[in-house]
Amino acid sequence: MVTFQTAMSDATSPGTATCARCDTTLTEGDRVVAGDRAFCRSCYDTLSHEVRQAVARMSEDINYPMAALGAVLGGAAGALAWWGFTVLTEISFGLVAVVIGFLAGHGAVRFAGGKRGTGLQAIAVTVGALSFLVAAYLVNMTFINQTLQQRGEGWRIPFPPHSVEMFSRVLAVNFGMMKLVFLAIVVYEAWLIPRPPKLDLAA
Ligand SMILES: [Zn+2]
């Protein structure tokens, strides 16, 4: 239909002779071009209002407990995947950690019923970063405990850690630049996925 109209108006003048919504003949002062189509001012205002409302609804009535649950499930699944991969292969392949941010972001969006918004971004970023740190703790814990076992030591690093201090000391064993880079990627993924779409409408 639209293609047909465009083709028809192409025959007379280049594409923008009539409004793509109401077929009114457009004048120089009453024509808004959006992409490859032209609208009269009032149709354009109606359309952009509808689009703005649709985007606003996307960030309204968000079920935050469900979103948080989805983010936690996603983050936990990603953390387990990284931990399992690292322990099984004994390769510290940090790039696998990126799935933590991906799953935390998608978990928040899915469990909130496909909504997006800054609140969901905050949840996904927080959960993604924490999941990454917990996963890094689990990896270190496993390798330290293997060493303790080989030495015949009787004590083990526990999970969950007994204190924040224990948590940070186990993390600090090998927390270098690469870990920081992977953490940044996790945070970026978790921030990007629940982001509401950017509107680029003429005023
Ligand atoms: Zn119109």
Image (cartoon, grey):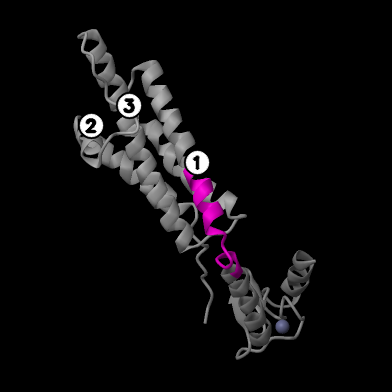
Residue 53's quadrant in the figure? Answer: bottom right
Q: Which residues are magenta?
A: 57-73
Look at the picture and state if 77 lies above or below 66.
Answer: above
Q: Is residue 77 magenta?
A: no
**Disc assigned to residue 74:** 1
Residue 23's quadrant in the figure? Answer: bottom right
SS label for mark 1: helix
Residue under pointer 2: 170
Mark 1–mark 3 distance (CA, rounded to whole Å): 18 Å
How packed is label 2: few (under 14 Cα within 10 Å), some, or many (20 or more)? some
Q: Does the magenta stretch mainly form a helix, a strand or a loop?
A: helix
**Disc assigned to residue 115:** none
Q: Amino acid at mark 2?
A: Val
Query: Contact, CB < 8 Å: mark 2 with mark 3?
Result: no
Residue under pointer 3: 139
Report the side of 171 relative to 117 (left or right): left
User: Along the line of sight, which residue is nearer the eye, 74 or 65?
Assistant: 65
Going from N to C along the chain, the mark reached first, 1 or 3, is 1
Residue under the image location 22 percent in, 38 percent down: 168
Q: Amino acid at mark 3?
A: Val
How packed is label 1: few (under 14 Cα within 10 Å), some, or many (20 or more)? many
Look at the picture and state if 100 lies above or below 109.
Answer: above
